Amino acid sequence: MKLSMSELSARLPGPPSGAWPQGERFMRGFAHGTMSVELYAPRGHDPQTPHAQDELYFVMQGRGELRIGDACHDFEAGDAFFVPAGMPHRFGNFTDDFATWVVFWGPQGGEQ
């Protein structure tokens, strides 16, 4: 299977929700078993809460900061991050063009 960032970006924003009254800023590309791949492109702020699965972020464009637990990391296009299941994390101070691939996988609660 192949994903195109431009094709998924064109489908954003998605439908409005409680966390995203202006429309969801993520779009699932595909899934297989416990793995799913999404494009995430928040605008203005990042309202996400910790996820039940382990996840990888691959920053495609933009720059900003990613707080993982108590640590804050600057990022730019080309950077990758691992966030274990249940770990609080949030993107901040990001540019208007920020977009990242997100890969979720494994059991609820993360791999041990």
Image (cartoon, rainbow, N blue to C red):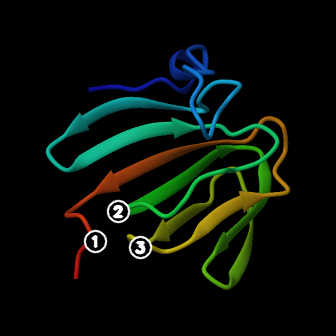
Discs 2, 3 touching: Cβ within 8 Å:
no
Task: Where is residue 62? Give x, y as percent.
Answer: 77, 45
Residue at 60% over, 14% down:
10
Residue hosting label 1 = 109
Extreme residue toward the left, this view? 33
Residue 18 versus residue 107 in the image, above or below: above
Crowding around mark 2 (Cα neighbors within 10 Å: few <14, some 14 to 19, many 20+) is: some
- Marks 1 and 2 sit apart, C-alpha to C-alpha, by 5 Å
The nearer-to-camera label among 2 and 3 is 2
Name the foreground residue: 23 vs 64. Answer: 23
The answer to whether 22 appears left or right of 25 in the picture is right
Quarter of the image where one finds residue 71? bottom right
Please state the horizontal and vertical placement of residue 33, each as a whole percent of the image. 14, 45
Secondary structure state at the residue bearing disc 2 = loop
Give whichever of discs 1 and 2 has the lower sequence position.
Answer: 2
The residue depicted at 59 percent of the width and 23 percent of the height is: 16
